[in-house]
Image (cartoon, grey):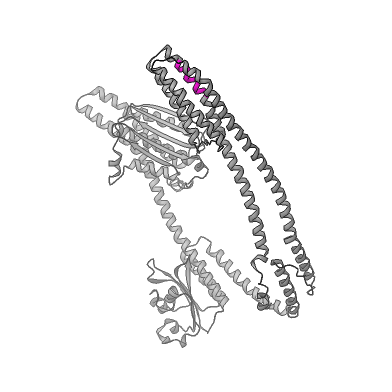
Amino acid sequence: MDKSRLASLDHLKWWERLSTRLTVSVAVALAIFLTMIGSTLWLSWQMEGAAAAINDAGTLRMRANQVALSLEALSNDPTGAATERLERQLHRQAFVLQQLRKGDPTRPLLLPRDPMVHAQLDQVTQYWHRQMVASVNLALKGDAAERYQIALPEFISKADLLVHLIEVDNAQKTFLLRLLQVVLLVIAIAGAAALIYLVYQWIILPISALRSGVARMADRDFSVSLPVQRRDEFGELSEGFNLMAKELKSLYVDLERRAEEKTQQLALRNASLSALYEMAAFLSQPREVEEVCRGFLDRIMRQFKADGGTIRTLDPRHDNLRLVLAQGLSATHEQHESCIKAGSCFCGQATRSGTVSIQDVTRIQAPEAFHCFDDGFHSLNVFQIMAQDEVLGSFSLHFKETRKLSASERHLLETLGKHLGVALQNRRLLGQTRQLAMEQERNLFAQGLHDSIAQGLNFLNLQLQMLDQSLKNDKIEEAKEILPLLRAGVDESYQDVRELLSNFRSKLGEGELLDAVCETIERFQRQVDVLVELDTEGLDEGTALTQEQQLQVLFILQEALSNVRKHAHASKVQIQIHEGVDFTLQVIDDGMGYDESALRHEAREQLGRRIMKERAARIGATLEQVSTPGQGAKVSLVLPILTSSHPRTDASENQPLQEGL
């Protein structure tokens, strides 16, 4: 279609466009709805504030009567306690009056803006301070309390009138709110009807006309012409449709020729897609780098009938190109170009500037300086190997005859270079992933040893020192008492080894966390003479935590108790485990504590504290450790229950270590 004829269609003013009308209509309707909804929300807020004001105003009467009762009690028992209670009641009454005047948007508490309401509040406030408070002060000085009793009915009457005025204003707002809701309903119905009508007139009817024209054109009736009756986008579409019909009518004669050309282009694209699919399928298979490069080079040389080819990769510093694979090149060529500088020769230039294409090597300056010429190659094409905009190297195709690649062939080879780059990058990342997994397994194993076996051995070491001291002092009875502890320590160390192996082979199941906690506490109490109080809530029917999270929580508890045993010198430990909105674990001891600021400034943080932090971070929890010298220490773990549905740890993390154990 003639571009000048198409350009002539784009002449609509902005106010003539259908998009403008639709946008304006929707904006107007949205503005009306938002205004009405905002008004109802504002009225609801005012009514809520007025309801709070009614409640507080009603309490004025109650507190006035309470003051009267307190005055009677004061006359019967003039003690300091009665006077203090009376002063508190007066202070509370004054505070309520002040709140009614100032309001409190946070509750909300809002007094209506009606001047009568505010005037009545002024009367109530003045009467209270001038009459009621004055009467109380006289009664406190020894006068009779009858004056307060006489003024009380008048104050209650004024307070009742204040409540009545607020209720009347609130009732008016309630009526207005209902009226706005009815109006909003009517507007919604009318707007929906208007929108349906406009959509039918502006969109559905023109689309029906266009569909009818398309149906006629599908029957090869290229004489179809749509009436242009609108000055909007559909009018432009109708004009464009008419021009398209005329153009199709003129092009129908040479349709077969055009179809043949398109068929040839489609065949080329299919061939390119087939090559891409085959290469992608090959590169996605788990193969070694050399095998991947050999298969890649074999396929592109076979497809493009190349006589030679190379694949080179950049070193980590991107300074040198190393020859990974070569086919069709002489041994001298391979030896001299086994490692070249990036940017030198044609293969090195491609890594810096992109694709390099030499149609005839004999026409370049000093061709004898290049090994390609010595090997008898006349054409050379070098492409980048890329992965995510990073150049990893280059690959080349060498031809004995002069060969010029088409634009589509160059594009295909550039795409294949990106596929090869992604494959090579994936192999590198896979190696890094394996190395990282090995490091994580070693770290996890070290943490497991520290959490279990190291603690037991430390206990045995302490007991052996005590046994040695007892034997040196010939305290046989003490030695006999230590021997059962040593035997129990050895048994528990053996159990720790079995538990460590079990932890890497399996994890806690649903409902097993509480049993494991109790078992840990019992083992702790066998090691030290410390009173342990366990408080649990929400764990009677199991827990929402995943198995991995339960295991990490148990390890954190074990480490916290180990720190108490080794450092706290405590006599009592409180363990609180609650599961509600969040899962919380607290370990509180009454031991000697430590200086938190001094510990933070140490060059190396305590291993146990660091391990607990790492375990908490692994499951997406927050860990807080607080202590004051001489006042014990507290370890707090908070884990949102939402995290339990999306654990951050890898369930397969322990699998390689499990097999090794």
Q: Nearer the viewer, residue 426 or 604?
A: 604
The x and y percentages for residue 101 are: 49, 34
The answer to whether residue 249 is above or below residue 434 is below
In the rendered image, residue 68 lying in the magenta stretch gets the answer yes
Principal SS element in the magenta part?
helix
| Residue 491 in sight | no
Q: Tell me the quarter of the image containing the C terminus.
A: top left
The x and y percentages for residue 240 are: 71, 72
Q: Nearer the viewer, residue 2 or 408?
A: 2
Residue range (magenta): 61-71
- The residue sitting at 27% across, 44% down in the picture is 602
User: Would residue 274 appear left or right of 225 to someone viewing this image?
Assistant: left
- The residue sitting at 75% across, 58% down in the picture is 200
The x and y percentages for residue 476 are: 24, 23
| Residue 559 in sight | yes
The answer to whether residue 261 is above or below residue 509 is below
User: Would residue 59 appear left or right of 204 to someone viewing this image?
Assistant: left
